[in-house]
Amino acid sequence: MPIGAFLLRRLGLGLVSVLGVSILVFLFLHMIPGDPVDHLAGGDATADQRKKVMECMALDKPLHVQFGRFLGSIADGTLGQQCPDPKGKPTVMARIVEVFPNTVALALCGMLVAMLLALPLGVVAAIRRGTWIDTVASITSLSGIAIPMMLLGPLLLMWFFIDLGWLPGPTELGPAAIVLPAIAVGTHLMAMLARMTRSSMVEVLGEDFLRTARAKGLPETTVIAKHALRNALLPVITIAGLQFGSMLSGAIITEKAFARPGIGLLLVDSISERNYPVVQGCVLVIAAVYVLVNILVDLAYGLADPRIRRA
């Protein structure tokens, strides 16, 4: 299939998925108990203030009119109006654009930490499988997922911020302040990637083309790095891409622990406030990014494996 036709097909399926997610979220939000006007206007709000919030969110209109208004806000790029308007950001898109770069930066740094830890651990464990090195590498990788995120974040803050004072703590957004959140996110992801790298490498190390490469006199490092690891990367790319899409939806616990504003934290706060426009906008952006990341993962397959590129 030509790459253009492939992209059009995947984009079309992605748009259908995003639309389906938007419809489900819209319906589920209106099934949640509680009055959103009470949460947003406050218990001591006047009748006029309550009326303004209700009109802003179109709660005085039928459901089909509200959904049509939401689709219209997607078309004009605003994703709806914030009700009330906090921090001078009248539209949902303006609020998301304000916090989304923080989540992207955290996801990229977390993925970098995960790959730097997972690939060496997985490769070493596969090459030395059955030995104590394999055991140590496996225990190290599994420890990342065994420690709950809600515990790892505070532990890192206690060690490196409170006790040692090496790194900035919560509420800061400088380059150094992202180190601890990235370690927390990356360590959790590292376990899955390391196990996947090991199992894929063990399978590839028994293939005939590696024996051929060694018979040609290629150095062992070249055989492992260029031939074995490259062919073992496909399942690793799959997991990494899916997890990266998940991290872009917001490492909620990490953002909460380190007081980092991001789309995940914005989504949780908006749900608790019953802020329908912001919740719908956040979910729409998250779904769109997730679909886009999956398309990029499919394209990365071709770069990693020439057989798929030719197909």
Image (spheres, helix red, strand yellow):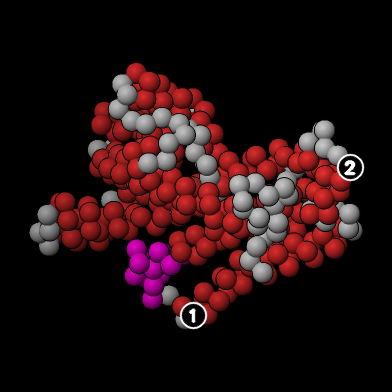
Q: Secondary structure at mark 1?
A: helix
Count every numbered label the image shows and give the total. Answer: 2
Q: Nearer the viewer, residue 181 or 46?
A: 46
Local packing at callout 1 (Cα closer than 10 Å; few below 14, some 14-19, many 20+) is few
Compute the Cα span from label 2 to label 1: 56 Å
Q: Can residue 90 be spotted in the picture? A: yes
Q: Amino acid at mark 1?
A: Gly
Q: Which residues are magenta?
A: 298-310
User: Looking at the magenta stretch, what is its main secondary structure?
Assistant: helix
Q: Is residue 201 above or below residue 12?
A: above
* Residue 184: % across, % down: 42, 34
* Foreground disc of the pair 2, 1: 2
Side (left or right) of 95 relative to 162:
right
* Residue 98: % across, % down: 53, 52
* Residue 69: % across, % down: 78, 64
What residue does disc 2 label?
A: 47
Q: Amino acid at mark 2?
A: Ala
Q: Is residue 64 above or below residue 54?
A: below
Which residue is pictured at 32% across the width and 49% down the height?
201
Query: What's the mark number on residue 154?
Result: none
What residue does disc 1 label?
A: 4
In the image, farthest residue toward the left: 217
Q: Is residue 301 magenta?
A: yes
Q: Considering the image in quadrants, where does the C terminus appear?
A: bottom left
Q: Nearer the viewer, residue 142 or 255?
A: 255
Which residue is pictured at 26% across the width and 40% down the height?
124
Side (left or right) of 79 relative to 153:
right
Q: Earlier in the sequence, mark 2 or mark 1?
A: 1
**Residue 45 occupies quadrant:** top right
Side (left or right) of 200 relative to 275:
left
Q: Can residue 31 be spotted in the picture? A: no
